[in-house]
Image (cartoon, rainbow, N blue to C red):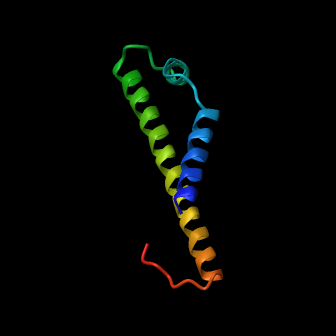
Amino acid sequence: MKLSCLAIVSAIACCGLAACVSPEQQRAQDSARCSGYGFASGSEGYANCMMQTSMARDQGERDKMAQFWAQDNATRRERERLAGLPPRGY
């Protein structure tokens, strides 16, 4: 069980690093997006765009993690069912 958890954490870390961009690169991408929408740097609209872009990215990451854990739990329950183990309360 501990090995399985370690493997999961390692996989998550590797996936995160594979898609990694520096904070400066992310800010530049966000800035280009908001400027592309017509917001002038320093304006209230630009600040709101930057904030919403960041919040959407954060929510996407939370959604990905929730999906990952739901799939992991389903896989674990199926393995336990096939092994004839009694269901646990998750």
**Which image quarter holds the C terminus?**
bottom left
Question: Is 35 in front, or is 1?
Answer: 1
Question: Is 31 in front, or is 73?
Answer: 73
Question: Is 13 in front, or is 40?
Answer: 13
Q: Count how many numbered circles sit on residues in the image.
A: 0
Quadrant of the rendered image containing residue 19: top right
Extreme residue in the top direction: 41
Q: Position of residue 81 (x, y in %)?
A: 60, 81
Position of 2 relative to 33 (above/below): below
Quadrant of the rendered image containing residue 73: bottom right
Extreme residue in the left direction: 44
Give me the residue at 56% from left, 74% from top: 77
Q: Position of residue 85 (x, y in %)?
A: 56, 83
Q: Position of residue 39 (x, y in %)?
A: 46, 20
**Which image quarter holds the N terminus?**
bottom right
Q: Position of residue 25 (x, y in %)?
A: 55, 19
Give me the residue at 53% from left, 22% from top: 22
Position of 78 relative to 6 (above/below): below
Give me the residue at 41% from left, 22% from top: 46
Position of 30 relative to 18 (above/below): above
Give me the residue at 46% from left, 48% from top: 62
